[in-house]
Amino acid sequence: MGIKAEVLQITTDLEHGEWLKARKKGLGGSDAASIAGFNKWKSPMVVYMEKIGEVESHTSNEEAAYWGNVMEATVAKEFSIRTGLKVRKRNAILKHPEHEWMLANVDRLIVGKNEGLECKTASEYLKDDWNGEEIPMAYLLQCQHYMAVTGADAWWIAVLIGGNKFVYKKIERDEGLIENLIEIEKEFWEKHVLKQNPPEIDGSEASSEFIKAMYPDAEPESETDLDKDSDKLLEALDQIKQELTDLSEQKKKYENQLKNKLGTYEKGFSNHFVVTWKTQERRTVDSKRLKAEKPDLYEQYSKVSKSRPFKYKEAK
């Protein structure tokens, strides 16, 4: 059984801008993990804004993305050497034969098999994510998305970790997971993108960075009336704040009890843990004194940073 996907756009001579434009016509493999909430670099809100054209498609780490593209051919070649499987490029944006909003821009297809290959590079700091049979959830969903679009029976993923460790793994088609993905993506596309109804903002770092980028500055002395749902959010936030305070006090209590057990020892061993309480020195600049005694030097080396602290209190 061969690849079932239809061709949305041939990409052989497609300019990058046109490629980005074509991607807005549906949801790709990397979008799948974001929509499902498993991509810490991109939230559902960012995907939504990209698809409706409010923001340009981007990645949080342009340098990593650049080297990922550069090394794709090397990773694919090494995969062929180690497995004996031949691979070929498919220079096209593919779409699901039934769900036309499901798109795939695959790295490679396996020659003679109904399978594909995803090529990755990863930092040395992420090596534990690939131990044993482990595959990061974002990439697992990406590959299942590709299998949904193409009808493939399996998908391989090959990754070069830290520039010197090569790992490859086979992901079998999971019909249950694919059905769930299709439902999640369909709801996102039809309920949010087509109706231009933004998804709920979540608590991810990606959403925080997105909001910071969208609203970097406040208009001086400006005010607004918040809607009635805001009180519910603030009451919930107030409850969490109190719970965190209680947990912080409990945490400090346990730490103090353990410090008392250590006394002057800097390391201790329990049945399951190693505890350290070492003496450290930290040198800091007395900025207040520097400003008073060396104002010119203080100004020369001062750096102005800009932020928008979020605060709230009960109205009187």
Image (cartoon, rainbow, N blue to C red):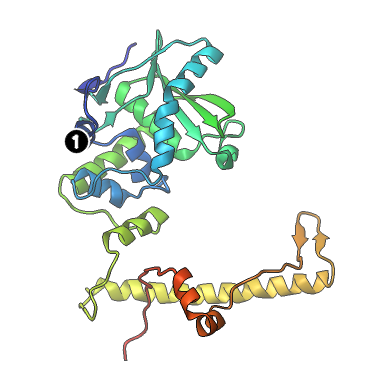
Name the foreground residue: 246 vs 120: 120
Q: Amino acid at mark 1?
A: Lys
Where on the picture, by quarter, is residue 177?
top left
What percent of the width, then of the height, locates residue 109?
38, 17
Name the foreground residue: 118 vs 308: 308
What percent of the width, then of the height, locates residue 22?
20, 32
Image height check: is 239 above or below 148?
A: below
Q: In the structure shown, which secondary structural element does the residue marked by tag 1 occupy?
A: helix
What percent of the width, then of the height, locates residue 75?
48, 23
* Residue most extreme to the bottom: 316
Q: Residue at x 35, y 50 (%)?
A: 43
What percent of the width, then of the height, locates residue 59?
35, 43
Question: From this viewpoint, is residue 176 visible?
Answer: no
Q: Is residue 52 left or right of residue 166?
A: left
Image height check: is 57 above or below 296?
A: above
Question: From this viewpoint, is residue 182 visible?
Answer: yes
**Disc 1 designates what residue?**
21
* Residue most extreme to the left: 195
Disc 1 residue crowd, few under 14, some 14–19, many 20+, Cα 10 Å: some
Where on the picture, by quarter, is residue 256?
bottom right
Q: Quadrant of the N terminus?
A: top left
* Residue most extreme to the top: 112
Number of dots carrying numbers: 1
Q: Quadrant of the C terminus?
A: bottom left
Q: Residue at x 56, y 76 (%)?
A: 246
Q: Is residue 241 left or right of residue 163?
A: left
